Image (cartoon, coloured by chain):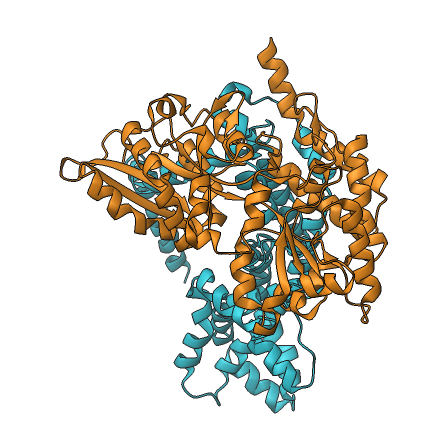
Chain colours: A cyan, B orange
Amino acid sequence: MKGNKEQMAKARFKIVSRREEGTASSLLASWFFLGPALLVIVVFFFLPVLAAFLMSFTDFDIYSLGNFQYARLIGLRNYTQIFHDPLFWKALQNTFYFVVVGGPLSIAVSLCAAMLIHSKLVKYKGVFRVVYFAPVVTTLVAVAVVWRFVYHPRFGLLNYAFGLLGISPVDWLGDPFWAMPAIIVLAVWKNFGYTMIIFLAGLQNISESLYEAARIDGASAWQQFKHVTLPMLAPTTLFISVITMIGYFQLFAEPYVMTQGGPLNRTLSIVLLMYQQGFRWWNMGYSAALAFVLFLVILAASLVQFRIQKGEAA
Amino acid sequence: MHLGCRPEAGGKKVVVFWAMGAEGENVQKLIPEFERRNPDIHVRLQAIPWTAAHEKLLTAYAGRSTPDIAQLGNTWIPEFTILDALVDVQPWIDRSSEVKKENYFPGIWETNVIDGTIYGIPWYVDTRLLFYRTDLLRQAGYDHAPRTWSEWFDASKKVRARATDTSHYAILLPTNNEWAPAVVMGLEKNSTLLRDGDRYGDFSGPTFTAAFTDFNNFFINGWAPRKTQQIINVYDAFAEGIFAMYITGPWNIGEFLKRLPASMQGNWMTAPMPTADSVYPGVSLAGGSSLVLFRASKVKDESWKLIEYLSEADRQAEFYKITGDLPAVRESWRDSSISSNKYIQAFYRQLERVAATPKIPEWEQIAQKVREYSEIVALDRMSVHDALAALDRDVNVILEKRRWMLDHEGK
């Protein structure tokens, strides 16, 4: 036993020293393999982010596009202006509405879908996986055309269905109250398939013996879900809630193609405001500053979420 | 593809032409005749949707890949002249037998002139005027459209008074998506909208305040609905008599003919804007699109030939038949297809009296602010006085860079 341990220690030492011998050449090799990827990341990610960060302290606009001399360094004025811009607060409010309602809804729907597909009673699992995943890989613009028909106040499928229940038609995308819920439903439908796949992987990793043990103890289906499935899925859920939240904070394409931010700016998101300021009015400096404010908002929200989930785990 | 090495199809000069929306889709039909007449020129047409047009043009400028010639909404011209992206077309006009200033509506021509230099040739024109229900106005005692503001207010009052249903109004002023009615009323009251060489907003000045007070009276007196986003389909609402008057543009002639029920077709008409003083018609907006030449183009003479071709009176009339766009060249209006349309006649009269909005790149942003505050006032969330003061404050923030630029250039 003892001799065996010594041998193992020696062997480990050998491996370590061999690794050290190879340092120079392996370092070169790792640079060689990582280099292209790092170069691409630096050129197409870090440099633009840095440029945008610097730009957020200037008033780069349509005049500056014609002549760089007309861009002025204005310090933090873009940032102070953002906090005095009622449109920013409106957009922030809308974005939070979307994240707070759409995020959990999206997670709940994808968890339900994953549970259903995972169930032993379900046949043709592959077909359902494809059907639920299809919206994720369909382009949003094509999807939007279909959904605009679904939401059409007079000829839409949704109002037709509501009509059968005796509910009077709603102008889903034209009514300030209903526009955001309509966008949320579309976004959840579009996105839940992706998180469903991750949940499915999580579910498959839960050992069947845990369920058996729970059943022997007389646990009901709900108790099994609450005391076995949910705790075992906790790491997956944390990952999914964080990526869903980050993704949902960047709400853009749905309102861009469906409502252009209207009616009454009720579906204006931060990224849509950023886009309008940047590419519609060409206020690039202001738009860049908005991007960094959004970054801080997402960072803060992610930290809060980590804190909460850690607290739950403890 | 780089600018310097455009492929010349079989030794032909290639002219790249960007056109927007319906014009982009339809102008293709006029191109074969042009290419037949000019065998050494090939036109490469790109149709760009309106929603993406502005961004595409600016990014093309930033990426140095502008077309040779483009259709440009005439309120966009100031922006592209600031960028120095367009060329002065006066030298070509001087040499042309086809394109002459006197062939065009003066107010429309004027929108293409920035600081005394002409940068575009009007292609088609657009303005706003009154569409109204002849039957409802007749019942209110008007056998003609209101010609003065006092007639306009009186007719509104009477139409509203006669309405049996409280959801029936006299006029639709859609503040949820339109800035035009408030601005048209301001222009009619001789407001310049901005002041001191377009350095500051002049909306809280006496002329615009007077116009905006009258505008607000439509809401205060209940002549116009306050919540306009509830009117989902203006055509149905117009046919139902939810409003009897509507300030809108030429594209709605076709829409009204198509969408109003047959029983309603005899009951509507168009008329120029009423006047606040004694000169009828009142002033309206000088809208439309122009054709411009880009500075970076290497085939300017060939491009000009295309502009000249599209400006021929016959081509203009033909284009009207395809798209319904009103011709910029006045002679084309004699074509039977136009002169026989009774709804269009009011537009000809109106186009004789149109005014340009301030010719600065910030205008569209300012116009959106005007709309926002029109909506706030229409919804009774602010007084006219407070709203216009706030509007000027916002506008002055937007114009801060312009002021700095003008002072900078002065030094």
Q: Quadrant of the C terminus of chain B?
A: top right
Q: Quadrant of the N terminus of chain B?
A: top left
Q: Quadrant of residue A71?
A: top right
Vertical comparison of B229 with B55: above or below? below
Quarter-of-image position of residue B302: top left
Q: Does B400 sit left or right of B310 as displayed?
A: right
Residue B77, horizontal then vertical, whole percent: 50, 32
Quick check: can you spot residue A122?
A: yes
Count of marks placed on residues: 0
Q: Where does residue B227 sit, x and y in percent of width and height?
A: 75, 59
Instruction: Give the residue displayed 39% in from the left and 51% down from the top.
Output: A9
Residue found farthest to the left: B10
Relative depth, front residue between B35 and A95: B35
Residue A218: percent from the left, percent from the top?
65, 91
In this picture, is A204 found above or below B120?
Answer: below
From the viewer's perspective, is A212 left or right of B284?
left
Q: Residue at x 62, y 31 (%)?
A: B358
From what the image shows, is residue B409 above or below residue B384?
above
Q: Nearer the viewer, residue B235 or A173?
A: B235
Residue B147 x %, y %: 72, 47
B10 with respect to B201 (left or right): left
